[in-house]
Amino acid sequence: MRVAVVGAGVAGLSFAARFGDTDVFEEHAEVGLPAHCTGLVSEAALRLVEAPGDVVLNSYDELLITDLEGRSVHFKLRRRAYLIDRPGLDRRLAERARRLYLNKRVAMISRGYVYTSGGDRYGPYDYIVIAEGSARRLSSVYGHVVGLAGVQVDVKSDFELPGIAVVYNRKLSRAYFSWIVGLDRGLYRVGLADTCCVVERLGKLVKIIRGKAVRAPFGGTVLAGPPLRRLVFGRVILIGSAAGLVKPLSGGGVALAAQSGRAAAEALARDTPSLYERATTPLRLKLRLAFEAFRALYGMRLIDVLLHRLDGESFVAVDYDDHVKTLAAAALMGKRSLAAGTEALVRYLLALAEGAQRVGNT
Ligand SMILES: Cc1cc2nc3c(=O)[nH]c(=O)nc-3n(C[C@H](O)[C@H](O)[C@H](O)COP(=O)(O)OP(=O)(O)OC[C@H]3O[C@@H](n4cnc5c(N)ncnc54)[C@H](O)[C@@H]3O)c2cc1C
C-alpha cells in the first residue's frame, strides 16, 4: 500500500512512525522550523508523543490566572505541566520517518497523485494523509476551522511570575487570552492570540512585564476548532490541526496531533480508514462541545467576572489549560465566591447544553 503524508509536524510524523512505509512531504527545508508553538503540554501528552527526556525543557506546578492589573487567582497544579522543545520533538519524530522529502510544498492532490509547487508529481498513492497543520491550504475545502493570529516572543524580565501565567485582559486580547511561561530564571515566553493587532498588543504585554526581547517574535495561526465532522474523504484522510483537532479553549493541539496520527495509521494498516473516524468520534464530540463553550463563554467574558470575585485566593487545579473550568470549579470551592461559582457553572452547563443541542441538530 502506498501512502503519502502532507506535512512533517507532530501529526504527520506520528502517523509515519506508526505506519512505517510512507512518503512524507514537508514544505520547509528543516523539520520543526520555523517554530510556531509555545510547547506546553500535559503529562499525559508527554507520554502520548513519546517525548524523549532531552526535549523536555521545564516543568511547572503553579498556574496564575491574572488580568495583570492587580487581580489574580493562584493555582497549585495537581498534575505538572511541561515545556517541550517543540522543534526538537519534531526532529526526533522525523528520525523514524522512512522517506522525508524536504522543501516540497504540496500544491495540489488529485486522483491519488501529489503535485508540488515546484512542478513535480508523485504517486499514485492508495491514500493521501493531510497533516498540514493550521495552514489548511488543502484541508479547508473539507470544512471550516476558526483561526486566530498567535504571536509570542522570549524576553528577559525582572517581573516575578510563577511557572505559567494566563492573562485575561481585553486590552491585550479581546477574543482569547495571553500567556507568560517561565523558561528559566528571569526568562519568559510571552504571547497572545486574537483576531487582530497581535503584534501591537504583544508589544504592550512585553512593556507591562518590563521585558526585553532575546529573540525574534514567532507564532502562527492558533486554531479554536471545531473538529471536522468527517475525517475521511475517499482516499484522503485528515489528521491533527488540519482536521480541526485542537482544544478550543486553549488552542493546544500537540497531543491531539499525535493521537490522531496514530489512530489513522492503525486504521490504514488494516486498510479500513473508517476505523479512524470511528475511533475519534467520542473525542470529536467532546471537542465540539468545548467549541460551543468557547463561542459562548469567551464572548460573555465570564472569566473576567470570576477573576474579579476570586481575586487573591488560592486553589488546587486539575487542569492547566481549561481555564474556564478551572476558575468555575475554584469558585464553587471558595465561600466568598460561591454565588459567582454557581452562576459560572450554570452558564458553563447552559453553554454546553446549547452546544449539545446544536451538535445534535446538525
Ligand atoms: C502560537 C501558538 C502556540 C501554540 N502553543 C501550543 C502549546 O503550548 N501546546 C500545544 O499543545 N499546542 C500549541 N499550539 C498548537 C500546536 O502547535 C498544533 O496543534 C500542533 O502543531 C499541530 O500539529 P500538526 O502536526 O497537526 O501541525 P503542524 O505542527 O503545524 O505541522 C504541519 C506541517 O506541515 C507543513 N506543511 C503545511 N502545508 C504544507 C504543504 N502544502 N506541503 C508540505 N508541507 C506542508 C508545515 O510546514 C508543518 O511542518 C500552538 C499553536 C500556535 C500557533
Image (cartoon, grey):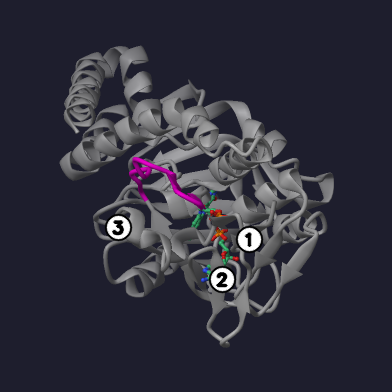
Whether residue 236 is situated above or below residue 53 in the rendered picture? below
- Is 339 on the left-hand or right-hand side of 259? left
> Which range is magenta?
224-237
Q: Is mark 2 within 8 Å of ligand 1?
A: no
Name the residue type under label 3. Answer: Ser
Q: Which residue is mark 1?
A: 4
Residue 320 % position (x, y): 51, 34
Real-space CA distance between mark 3 and mark 1, rounded to the nearest whole angstrom: 39 Å
Nearest the eye: 14 or 217: 14
Q: Give the quarter the ligand 1 occupies.
A: bottom right
The quadrant in which residue 350 appears is top left
Q: Which mark is residue 120?
A: none
The residue to which callout 3 is attached is: 173
- Residue named by callout 2: 114
Gap in angstroms between the C-alphas marked 2 and 3? 39 Å
Residue 185 visible in rendering: no
Contact (CB < 8 A) between labels 2 and 3?
Answer: no
Task: Count numbered badges in the picture.
Answer: 3
70 on left or right of 271:
left
Give yes or no for residue 235 being in the magenta stretch: yes
Q: Nearer the viewer, residue 22 or 1?
A: 1
Q: Nearer the viewer, mark 2 or mark 3?
A: 2
